[in-house]
Image (spheres, grey):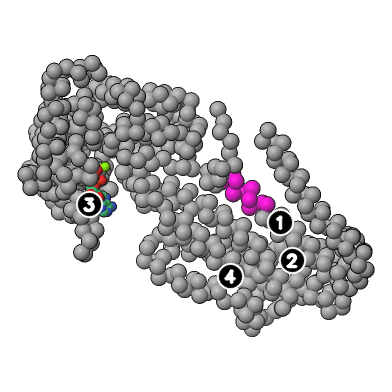
Amino acid sequence: MLTEQQSTRATPSFDVVPGEGGREAIKLEKAEVVYGRGKRTTQALAPTQLRVEKGEFVALVGPSGCGKSTILKLVSNLLAPSSGHVHVGGREVGAKRVGVGMAFQNPTMLPWLSVRDNVMLPLKIVPPFRSRFRKARKGEFRDRADALLEKVGLKGFGDKQPWQLSGGMLQRASLCRALIHEPELLLLDEPFGALDQFTREELWGILQNLWLESKPTVLLVTHDLREAAFLGTRICVMSPRPGKIIDDQPVPMARPRTISMTYDQDFVRLTQQLRELITHSRPDVA
Amino acid sequence: MEFVEKIRQKLAAAMLILGVFVVWEIACLLMGIPEIVLPRPTVILETLSARLPQLMPHVLQTLGTTLTGFVMGVTVGMLLGAIVGSSRVAYDTAYPLLVGFSSIPKVAVVPIFVLWFGSGTVPAVLTSFIICIFPVVVNVATGLATTEPELEDVLKSLGAKKREILWNVGIPRAMPYFFASLKVAITLAFVGTVLAETIASNRGIGNVMMIATSSFDVPLVFSGLFLLALLGVALYLVFSLIERRVAGWAMRKSELPTL
Ligand SMILES: Nc1ncnc2c1ncn2[C@@H]1O[C@H](COP(=O)(O)OP(=O)(O)O)[C@@H](O)[C@H]1O
Ligand SMILES: [Mg+2]
């Protein structure tokens, strides 16, 4: 452990550090979250272990209120664990800048910016784009935002204000915002929740392609088991609140996966098994 | 469609103002109200145009005083608002003090300023300054304090620094509140200036009206009132226009769906 850290410090780029530490993208170590203070506290997350390798696509499923969003907030450093540790990119979260793209459960667009400007927001903040933002916002970056918007079916909506879009459209725009800076770590909190079945399946395909292209590490929260099985390389199942991970299994199906594959026997068996796990899980059993 | 609607609205507003003056004029004529009690609008306008060269320096004096006090008040108000609005503790602690401070009638402080600085422009500037701090502080603080944490999270998750979050979320979010307060503050600043000029100055419209009153030159008094109203409306319009440009996103009702 010690030698690993030393070698990290000696080498300028983290990516070239050999061995296990270099492959690790996310690690939760007995990470626990308790909301509130004094008498009124809620344990949102029981001490949880989770390890995600670089380039993995982990789907996180579980009953609502079990702490899925909380895990994403830990990983994106919006929340500090009450106890335990959260490592991102091999270091304590926040210690090192990691390109993170996050789509929140509510598509939180800034109401004073147009949809396009909202999508371009990460380019304004995140290096190395930020230094070029002033120059490229009307040219290269703008085209990039428009190209992404077109990919998710929002062509021509860049100039609209957020309130002119429906909930599902906002979620798609929010997905664009999470992707635009090509982050190495993608955190998606029920990104397709407000979409109709057809759009949702279409976007699964788009997201799969994006992942196959650049292989970012993805942590996807969802309550749709088909979605988890279609997209994930691994599925983690959480127990009801206070949540922790009670099952963790790989999804062996070949890629690229198609929607029709989700009706195959293997697939159905997998989702069926997950469903049973979730419906039968009780805090005391876990 | 929308254009016609707007024109009609503007026309109605103009008609109303004109109507008030016509009624005023006719009422004065019919009831034979003497000029010394209530001069007719035409008489006021006559006085105004005849005396304008003589009044102009006072108009500029009042305008300058008001704007100086206003700019100072807004600057201080903005800074205080930013401090008060950026932390829960500051918000809870400072609010009672601010409310107490603002409930002091401003007439009461003018003599104190005169005592400190002598009569003249300084007390007038200071009066308009302190009178317009409060609405700015309250509005900016409220705007910042009510910023949705979810919006800040968007920036935080990108690794943005405190300053960047303030710049990209806090400030734009507080803008509509800020501009709403500017419109209130500019009218209050006028009240402050004229108040101080009336009590302790030898220049400005307030002073002119004071002197005119003591010499029973009622048309001149009303000319002063007219000028004040005009200036007030003009500045209010200026800030409404700026508001529309900068913080228009908060006024979506006036927008028509376009495709
Ligand atoms: N800011 C908060 N304050 C108090 N309790 C919270 C807060 N955020 C979430 N919780 C509670 O923590 C639990 C887990 O929340 P969350 O992670 O959002 O669940 P989900 O799995 O549905 O995303 C829930 O029971 C929720 O009520
Ligand atoms: Mg959630």
Q: Which residue is disc 4 drawn over?
A: B130
Is B20 placed left or right of B244 in the picture?
right
User: For this rendering, which residue is in front, A243 or B161?
Assistant: A243
Q: Which residue is disc 2 drawn over?
A: B61
**Front disc: 1 or 4:** 1
Label pair 3/1, CB-CB below 8 angstroms: no
Q: Amino acid at mark 3?
A: Ala
Vertical arrangement, residue A75 with respect to residue B84, above or below: above
Provide the secondary structure element on which disc 3 rests.
Answer: loop
Q: Which residue is disc 1 drawn over?
A: B233
What stretch of residues is rendered in magenta?
A: B237-246
Label pair 3/2, CB-CB below 8 angstroms: no
Q: Quadrant of ligand 2?
A: top left
Per the model, the C-alpha gap separating discs 4 and 2 is: 19 Å
**Front disc: 3 or 1:** 1
Q: Chain of mark 1?
A: B
Q: Earlier in the sequence, mark 1 or mark 4?
A: 4
